[in-house]
Amino acid sequence: MIFSLSLAFPSERLPFGVSLMQLAVVCLVLAILLRIVQGVYIHPLKNVPGPLLAKISSISVYLANLKGVRSHTLLNLHDKYGPYVRVGPNEVSISDPEMYRKIYTRGASIKEDSFYSSTRLTPPNENIFSMRNKAQHAARRKMENDPYSLQAINQHEPVIWNKAHIFLKRIISEAAASSSHSVDVHPLCGLFSLEVICQVAFDNDLDAESTAPGLNFLHAMSQAAMITPLTDTFPLLAHTKLSESLPGIIGKAFSQRRQWEETTRAIYTSFKRQSEQTGRGGKEKFLASPFVHKIDDFLGRRLTEDEGLEEAMGLAFAGSGTTSTTIVYILYHLSRPENRAMQLRLREELCSPDGSAASVTDLPYLNAVIKEAMRLNPSLMGTLPRILTTTVVADTDDDHVQAGTKHKPLVFPPGTRIAMQNYVHHRNPKVYPDPHSFNPDRWLGTTGSSSAAEKAFTPYSLGPRNCIGQNLANLELRVATALLFRNLDFRLNPTMREEDMEMEDRFAALVRGGKLLLDVERLSPAA
């Protein structure tokens, strides 16, 4: 009976002899046609260059996001269509660095809600990165700022040197244990950055006897990194406890986030307990101290333990993976055979009388090498989406703009989703000639670093929402790079392939191959 009813239902007739099924099909076709007409001919973004499919659907970007190639896909689209590309019905990707300042720092936009909601680590708690409310963010930034000042960070310099020496000794030890003197430095870079952030943030030395706890912690954070693009595309995943039970890499990512949370909770709870026992003065210099002692003016109170945990998880992630990725790519680029002269030049600077001092702040070639690695391989490579709150007009008088749109300003109305990413505008050929080449000299007087190049360089973002930890990151990068290249010679192991070092876009960059095998020669006893 049920079967016969289900067959009879579609054949029920409406006036004019039309069945319900036929009506449904007609409505679906009309809806699709309306979507096409609206997206292609009527929408305010109809004149923005881009692929035809993007005018009616964001499916291409969603798929690229899930594959970890969103930024690469957008770069290819900009190479084809110019600095302004429509990548979805209501989304425009922009590669013009001047527009970055106009949109991201001058009050022309707000954070896009769905993406930043997906960066919460223990929903509904918010962290300093995920906050969309400007007043809420300003209060949290004010609460956290003091330990990140340059003066405060410099107090941790002895700790950073100590961790860098441990990093150096690990490389030397692994090279000595290998018949070919080859070392996979990728996990060691991660350990260095993680141990630094645990020490300067939580006064925690991890496990001095074993690298296993640190490596497990890094693995959990790395595997969980794909949750942000997943929940940005499928928001329901963030609101169900069944996510960990899903098969394959999705379930694994969510289970690893739980491991990340549990490890951070143990570290943060220990720090909080000790901090409350010793009082504010005993732990004030540590980055997590404000989570325990300071008042958040927006909330009008101190953070709860769960709110502090949310911030602590973000701090552990941002303070470890991002810096270590930059160190990995510095080692990679300088170890390539074609860049041999660059490594020798850096070592000459480091081993000169001026370069051998403990302070490495003012060494020009060292700083140029670091900047070039951050330009070419930004550790935060993904899209920072914004929603326009005011009309923005873009001048299209540009050699890269397609014929037919040249000299016609493009108008982006309020409500437009804007996508910009370091990976794309750091490779803008009009700003950085030969943009895919690693060339530290572009930052020095030998070729002349232009003001446009400096303005377009945004590894830490810009404005009031820029990276709060950039002083610490810069010090880590200088210390580690100086110590390693002063004491060791590196050559890329012949087994390494180009694709091993491709960047995977999980918002934070991951090394696709998960390894960097180098042949290492010790030049002198560790300083």
Image: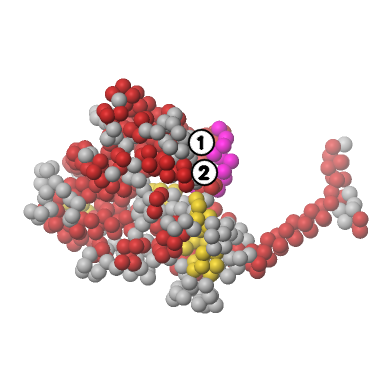
The residue to which callout 1 is attached is 123
What amino acid type is highlighted by mark number 1? Pro
Q: Is residue 297 above or below residue 426?
A: above
Q: Is residue 370 above or below residue 298?
A: below
Q: Magenta segment: does it hold 228?
A: yes
Question: Which class describes the residues within 10 Å of circle 2: few (<14), some (14-19), or many (20+)?
Answer: many
Question: Which class describes the residues within 10 Å of circle 1: few (<14), some (14-19), or many (20+)?
Answer: some
Disc 2 to disc 1: CB gap under 8 Å: yes
What amino acid type is highlighted by mark number 2? Ser
Quadrant for the C terminus, please: top left
Quadrant for the N terminus, please: top right
Q: Which range is magenta?
A: 224-241
- The residue that appears at 71% across and 62% down in the rendered structure is 34
Task: State the image quarter where residue 166 is shown.
Answer: top left
Which badge, 2 or 1, comes first in the chain's sequence?
A: 2
Helix, strand or loop for disc 2: helix
Helix, strand or loop for disc 1: loop
